Image (cartoon, helix red, strand yellow):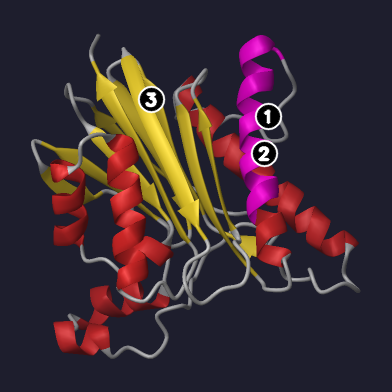
Amino acid sequence: MRIISSALTDVGRKRDHNEDNFYLHKEENLFLVADGMGGHASGEVASKIVVETIRDFFTRTSKDPDATWAYKMYKDKKYEENRLIVSIEEGNKRVYEHSMKVSKDKKRGMGTTITAVLFVEGGAYIGWVGDSRIYRIRNNKLEQVSEDHSLLNEMIKKNNMTEEEIENFPHKNVILRAIGLKPRVEVDVKYYPLQDGDIFLLCSDGLSGEVVDDEIERIIIEADDLDDANKKLIQEANKNGGKDNITAALAQYFEN
């Protein structure tokens, strides 16, 4: 198994600081993107904490398989799936505890989304909380494989909204699940068998909110390489308004 990867983040055209974070944990074949929220640098702190906690958890448990976990493993899930879920749960715990410690500070109520892709032999686990997205590109076709934890997505599922209703929905920024808002969080995880050449895109809504899926697909397919694809994705999001921070991470799987 061989994985190549690339990531890029940009403040966008409207914000004065970047609350997104990413990490390419190449030793563990683990790739992360987080979109912080809360303002006054709170989001930047939250996204940094969750990314670093997940990174450190994987490094620690790789070096010492008997290392103590913050939460018990789920008996109905495989070891690597458990590592992903528990690392995100530990990240949630750290962000929440930090928020409580600074309760008189502007960081109270800080939160963040998280998206993660963990490659294992023959497959990949994806895990997420919030509305940052994970896409898979297979045979030059883009498919969203995560599901937004957002009010808009819930309304779409319940009401069969039209494209015009979706476009005019006034609460697109309301998310229903996030890291750090409660002591425990529910993590969604899926497993996907892999085919040679599969690409996964992890991105904050600064990209997916500004660039339609068909254009994301075209840019990635036509790019010279993953670095070029990320550069052009961010350029397109900024060209379309750049109203939020923009982060894109790409990871491509090869059988050998």
Which residues are drawn in magenta?
A: 47-66
Q: Is residue 243 visible?
A: yes
Could you say where residue 78 lies in the image, as x and y percent from the top left?
A: 44, 23
Q: Residue at x 27, y 24 (%)?
A: 253
Picture layout, residue 99 above or below residue 139: below
Picture layout, residue 174 above or below residue 126: below
Q: Amino acid at mark 2?
A: Glu
> Circle 2: is it few (<14), some (14-19), or many (20+) Cα within 10 Å?
some
Q: Residue at x 31, y 12 (%)?
A: 1
C-alpha separation, residue under disc 1 versus residue under disc 2: 6 Å
Helix, strand or loop under label 2: helix
Check if residue 63 falls in the magenta segment: yes
Could you say where residue 10 lies in the image, as x and y percent from the top left?
A: 49, 57
Check if residue 65 falls in the magenta segment: yes
C-alpha separation, residue under disc 3 versus residue under disc 2: 19 Å
Q: Please name the residue that numbered disc 1 is placed on.
A: 56
Q: Please name the residue that numbered disc 3 is placed on.
A: 119
Circles 3 and 2, Cβ within 8 Å, touching? The answer is no
Could you say where residue 89 lies in the image, as x and y percent from the top left?
A: 62, 44
Direction from residue 122 to residue 23 in the image, left or right: right
Q: Quadrant of residue 45?
A: bottom right
Q: Please name the residue that numbered disc 2 is placed on.
A: 52
Circles 1 and 2, Cβ within 8 Å, touching? The answer is yes
Helix, strand or loop under label 3: strand
Q: Nearer the viewer, residue 99 or 255?
A: 255
Q: Amino acid at mark 3?
A: Phe
Q: Earlier in the sequence, mark 3 or mark 1?
A: 1
Could you say where residue 80 lies in the image, as x and y percent from the top left?
A: 48, 23
Picture layout, residue 149 above or below residue 55: below
Helix, strand or loop under label 1: helix
C-alpha separation, residue under disc 3 versus residue under disc 1: 17 Å
